Image (cartoon, grey):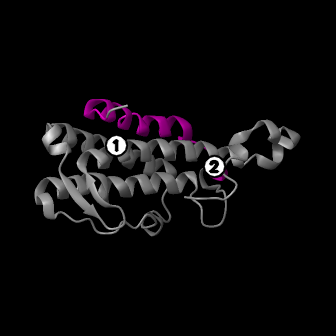
Amino acid sequence: MRFELESAIDVLRRTPPGLQALLGGVADPWARGTEGPEAFSSFDVVGHLIDGEETDWIPRARIILARGADARFEPYDRFRHRERNRGRSLESLLTEFAGLRAANLELLRSWRLGDPELDLAATHPSLGRVTLRHLLASWVVHDLGHIAQVSRVMAKQYRDEVGPWVAFMPVLTDHEAPRS
């Protein structure tokens, strides 16, 4: 499937209400349960998505658009959100995420990007040359991956409770090694 900006925006705008539907009002064990000691909980995922809104997707797009061929990204700290969100409620994170995402998508639309802009590139610290098109497509895939992760992490809270039916529930066994 070829990247189309409006189609990407259509998917990106669905993430906040989707997470709100899945996580809004859930009890703390559902929100804070993980797959393992260093893995993300659903709470962590929302915090990580907020951090991406503030320090990753749009800021990196701006770098590409402003600096041209010499654009370079700084490394991204995907755990930065943990300290920032200590003591906060999941509801406050969901609300903040929805506001940041709406503002970022409005800004992205206002840029009226075409193929020439989408083909501009920067240097990623570990991936090398990446285009704005790559960055924006990755934003969509990143969201979808974390939506799947939230569902998987929540499902695993009942791993021991399903008994022998675990054999019919690949969501409980597909990712044996926890990852964030």
The residue under label 1 is which amino acid type? Ala
Magenta: main secondary structure equals: helix
Q: Is residue 8 left or right of residue 41?
A: left
**Residue 59 coordinates in the image, percent (x, y):** 24, 57
Instruction: Please give the residue where the numbered disc 2 appears in the rendered image.
Output: 153
Specify the quadrant that holds the C terminus.
Answer: bottom right
Element type at mark 1:
helix
Q: Nearer the viewer, mark 1 or mark 2?
A: 1
Residue appearing at x 82%, y 49% in the figure: 160
Residue appearing at x 17%, y 50% in the figure: 120
Q: Nearer the viewer, residue 2 or 111?
A: 2
Q: Quadrant of residue 6?
A: top left
Q: Nearer the viewer, residue 120 or 98?
A: 120
**Residue 39 coordinates in the image, percent (x, y):** 59, 61
| Residue 7 falls within the magenta-colored stretch | yes
Instruction: Please give the residue where the numbered disc 1 appears in the rendered image.
Output: 137
Q: Is residue 179 above or below residue 91?
A: below
Label located before the other in sequence (1 or 2): 1
Q: Is residue 136 above or below residue 77?
A: above
The residue under label 2 is which amino acid type? Val
| Residue 63 falls within the magenta-colored stretch | no
**Residue 131 coordinates in the image, percent (x, y):** 25, 51
